[in-house]
Every structure is written in structure tokens, then in C-alpha cells.
Amino acid sequence: MGRIRIRMSPAPASSTSPMIDAHGLGFTRRDESVFGPLDFILRGGEIGLIEGDNGSGKTTLLRVLAGLLRPSFGKVQVLGAQPGSEEARASTITMGHLLGLKADLSALENLRVGMGLYGHAAASDPRAMLARVGLDGYADEAVRSLSAGQKKRVALARLALLPARLWLLDEPYANLDRHGISLVNDLLAQHAAAGGAALVTSHGAVNFHQGVTCTIRLAA
């Protein structure tokens, strides 16, 4: 049976509405518990870390919060609405193991497509963002020709460009070197400082930055 441990760090009282508000949340598969019951609140300016070994339910939890799976029991709201609703999807970005990049398009074209889908094409410079994530000179390279780490950096550039308030990130440190790990931490810190929130999975292979508000530990 899955077990969840929540370790809360001291955080200043906030009047902002919760971005994620879970009460007794759980998920079962073939009558076996995957996780739960789980209670936690994540507000703007906060980062939550989900830890656990492979198969412990980290990805399943994120998929429930993204509205891709229905919880088996309990209640949860994302941005004041049901997970997967139009209101929640409009301000949420999920980044998983499958990065959602078009292999035949260039890195720059992938960013422009993502920005266009979010109606955010006019205000930002995708070429400058590629340079910021360490892909200066790769803007016109087809994504299929990039390494796994470079593809992850394209996905991170897209994440930083889009105007979502809530990030749900599944193993964002995978396939990255130490510079890439620092990049993820910097992006998370800036997102939180701007009032955004993020829930991030990790199997514990990295030393997560100090902005974590709560840690959810999943064990098989």
C-alpha cells in the first residue's frame, strides 16, 4: 500500500487562494492503493516537492492534479476549479517524461507553436529564451537532432515563456547536467517570486533548492 508523508516548512501566512487544495485525496488501481489519503495546500509563491522511488505514485499524483486521471476518493481543487476543467487548464502547465515537442520542427518553431496556443506570442522573445537555457546557436536545429538534455532545455524554455500560474513538473531534473539542474532551480525560484506555484517530482537524486514549502514522500 502506498504511504505519503508530508513535511511542511514554516511559511508566512498568506491570504492568497490555494492553487492546489487537496483533502483526503487518493487513487487506487485494481483495488490496490497507489497513494492517499493526502491533505495539502499549495499557494502562490510556494514550491512543493514530491519524493519517491520509481513506481511509488509520483506521476499518478500529477496526472490526477492535471485532470488526466480521476481521483478514487477525496476532494481536490486546482486554481479553484476541478482538475482538468477549462479554468484549471488555462493557467496550468504540465511537463512530463514525454515533453510534447514536435520532432520535425526546430527548437524555435516549437516555442512559437506553444506561445501561439497560449495566445502569448507578442510579448516575449523565444530566441533569447533559448540562449538563456543554454541553446544559443540551436534555435534552428530540428528537435529530433538534439540530445535528450537539449530537448529538456527546449521544454524548459517553453515552460518559462508561457503565462501559466501553476507548474506540474514530473522529474524536471532528468537528463540534465549540474548546470541544467541549476537552471531548473533558477526558473522555479523566479516563478515563485512572481507569485506562481509549482509541484515537482523527484526520486531524491538532486539537492532541491531552499524554496520548498512542503515535501510529500511517496513509498511503494
Image (cartoon, rainbow, N blue to C red):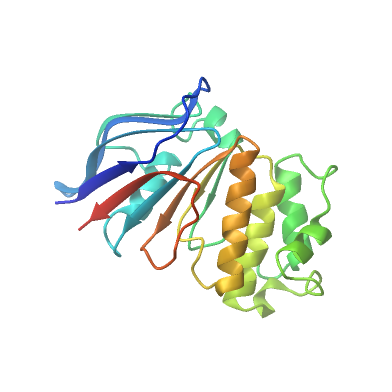
Q: Residue at x 37, y 63 (%)?
A: 204
Q: Position of residue 211 (x, y in %)?
A: 50, 47
Q: Position of residue 112 (x, y in %)?
A: 77, 54
Q: Is residue 100 visible in this depiction of the protein? A: no
Q: Nearer the viewer, residue 68 or 189?
A: 189
Q: How many numbered markers are drawn?
A: 0
Which of the 4 image quarters holds residue 176? bottom right
Q: Is residue 185 visible in this depiction of the protein? A: yes
Q: Is residue 55 left or right of residue 33?
A: right
Q: Nearer the viewer, residue 100 or 207?
A: 207
Q: Residue at x 51, y 60 (%)?
A: 172
Q: Is residue 29 left or right of residue 196?
A: left
Q: Position of residue 220 (x, y in %)?
A: 20, 58
In the rendered image of this protein, does residue 145 appear above or below residue 100? below
Q: Residue furthest top?
A: 15
Q: Nearer the viewer, residue 165 or 69?
A: 165
Q: Nearer the viewer, residue 125 or 44?
A: 44
Q: Residue at x 64, y 73 (%)?
A: 150
Q: Is residue 33 left or right of residue 95?
A: left
Q: Position of residue 216 (x, y in %)?
A: 32, 47
